Image (cartoon, helix red, strand yellow):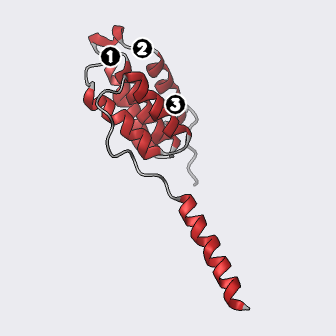
């Protein structure tokens, strides 16, 4: 009588563990993907919380198109945002700051505004505000 119960519990645990596994990142991303296809696939992976897959699409996009002033900042934003969503705030903060530094260049006129605006907004949430409230020390 104990054996069927043991088998049932083992099966439930096994299926539970299998269901929790994150699918691996894509092994090979086709060379002919358009920027829109990179972002579509990256967004689908993000929506499914397949963080590593999403990161792979955005990172490979940046490797293949390092000088793209339109989609490059968008890919950098998405990478930083994934770290933010995962709760890795120190990495997210660094990546958002790196992206914002790009907007100090002469090329910034050609870059879309939304990655800068959203990065600033999220950094405002990540970095605690300095206050003018004096610190009271116990006597």
Within the image, what quadrant is residue 96 found in? top left
Q: Please count the marks in the image.
A: 3
Q: Give the labeled residue for mark 3.
A: 122
Which residue shows up at 38% across the image and 23% down it? Answer: 35
Residue where numbered disc 1 is placed = 69
Residue hosting label 2 = 112
Q: Is residue 48 above or below residue 113?
A: below
Question: In front: mark 2 or mark 3?
Answer: 2
- The residue carrying pointer 1 sits among few (fewer than 14), some (14 to 19) or many (20 or more) residues within 10 Å by Cα, namely some
> Residue at (42%, 26%) from the top-left corner?
37
Residue 26 percent across, percent down from the top left: 38, 44
Marks 2 and 3 sit apart, C-alpha to C-alpha, by 17 Å
SS for dot 2 = loop
First-in-chain label (2 vs 3): 2
- Residue shown at the point (39%, 42%) measured from the top left: 91
Left or right of 136, for residue 29: left
Q: Quadrant of residue 76?
A: top left
Viewer-nearest residue: 128 or 115: 115
The relative height of residue 4 versus residue 46 in the rendered view (above or below) is: below
> In which quadrant is the N terminus drawn?
bottom right
* Residue 16 appearing in the image: yes
Mark closer to the chain start, 1 or 3: 1
Q: Mark 2 and 3 residues: CB-CB less than 8 Å, in contact?
A: no
């Amino acid at each position: 009588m104990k054996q069927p119960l043991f088998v049932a519990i083992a099966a439930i645990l096994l299926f539970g563990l299998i269901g929790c596994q994150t699918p691996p990142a894509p092994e090979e991303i086709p060379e002919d993907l358009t920027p829109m296809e990179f972002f579509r696939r990256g967004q689908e992976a993000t929506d499914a919380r397949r963080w590593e897959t999403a990161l792979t699409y955005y990172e490979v996009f940046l490797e293949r198109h390092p000088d793209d002033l339109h989609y490059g900042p968008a890919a950098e934003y998405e990478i930083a945002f994934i770290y933010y969503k995962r709760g890795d705030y120190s990495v997210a903060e660094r990546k958002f700051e790196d992206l914002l530094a790009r907007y100090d260049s002469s090329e910034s006129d050609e870059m879309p505004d939304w990655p800068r605006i959203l990065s600033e907004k999220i950094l405002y949430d990540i970095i605690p505000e300095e206050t003018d409230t004096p610190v009271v020390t116990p006597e």
